[in-house]
Amino acid sequence: MPAPLDRLLLASGNAKKLAELRGLLEPLGIALVTPEDIGGLPEVIEDRPTFAGNSAKKATSAALHTGLWALADDSGLEVAALDNHPGVRSARFHADHGRDPGDDVDAANRAELLAQLQALPDAPRDARFQCALALAQPDGEIVAEFAGKTHGRIIDTERGGQGFGYDPLFEFAEPGSTLAGSTFAELTAEQKASISHRGRALANLARWLERVSRTPG
């Protein structure tokens, strides 16, 4: 590695994502740096067709701007009946379809999702969350990428008061888990991290960081 990885910038201003990531880094002795800590980051247009492409673009931009190791993620919901939309447009689903978000973008995205599925009453509700993480070294080169996904279904009525985004509509449905049948918004942060797309991607990142930290030189 060209520089010690003792500080890591998360290229996201999402407070809930920051909270999810902070717990991973602290046991590894890595300090989490937020965009707010360094006066903000340049806006990155997320125009790549894949989660991995967008996360890599954001990580490279953040590293070059700050000279820090930078981690970026791109994640979203794919619904089979909607040809895997909203996909990479998950955060902007409402805008793509002309829905006014008012003061709550997450609620507007959920409303648009339900409206589109209600027009397909007999379609299956199978869905999955995808997450792609990209780690850039200070010169902007992407040195590692990690992925995670989790399977479930979209329900008609929101349940739970935790989480964010589409969590109240996403019912975890992987067989064999005691958490199956719960929406992501009904889970504690610890429960969600154990099965979520982001939690699984972070677990892959953690294993990589642990392995690198044990490598001589």
Image (cartoon, rainbow, N blue to C red):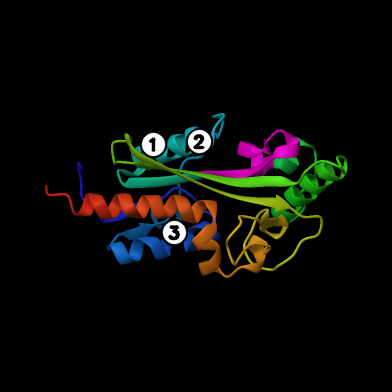
Name the amino acid type tagged 1. Answer: Thr
User: Is residue 177 on the magenta stretch?
Assistant: no
Mark 2 neighbour density, 10 Å: few (under 14) some (14–19) many (20 or more): many
Residue 95 position within the rendered picture, expressed as x and y whole percent measured from the top left: 73, 40
Q: Residue 62: image x %, image y %? A: 40, 42
**Which residue is disc 1 drawn over?**
60
Residue 21's disc number: 3
Real-space Cα distance between discs 2 and 3? 19 Å
Amino acid, disc 2: Asn
The part of the chain drawn in magenta is: 74-92
Please give the residue where the numbered disc 2 appears in the rendered image: 54
Q: Nearer the viewer, residue 34 or 78?
A: 78
Reading the chain from its start, which is encountered first: label 1 or label 3? 3
Q: Would residue 176 appear left or right of 170 to someone viewing this image?
A: left
Query: Are discs 2 and 1 less than 8 Å apart at CB?
Result: no
Q: Residues within 10 Å of mark 3 (few under 14, many from 20)?
A: some
Category of crowding for the residue at label 1, using alpha-carbon neighbours closer than 10 angstroms: few (below 14), some (14–19), many (at least 20): many
Mark-to-mark CA distance, 2 and 1: 10 Å
Residue placed at 78% from the left, 37% from the top? 97
| Side (left or right) of 155 relative to 30 | right
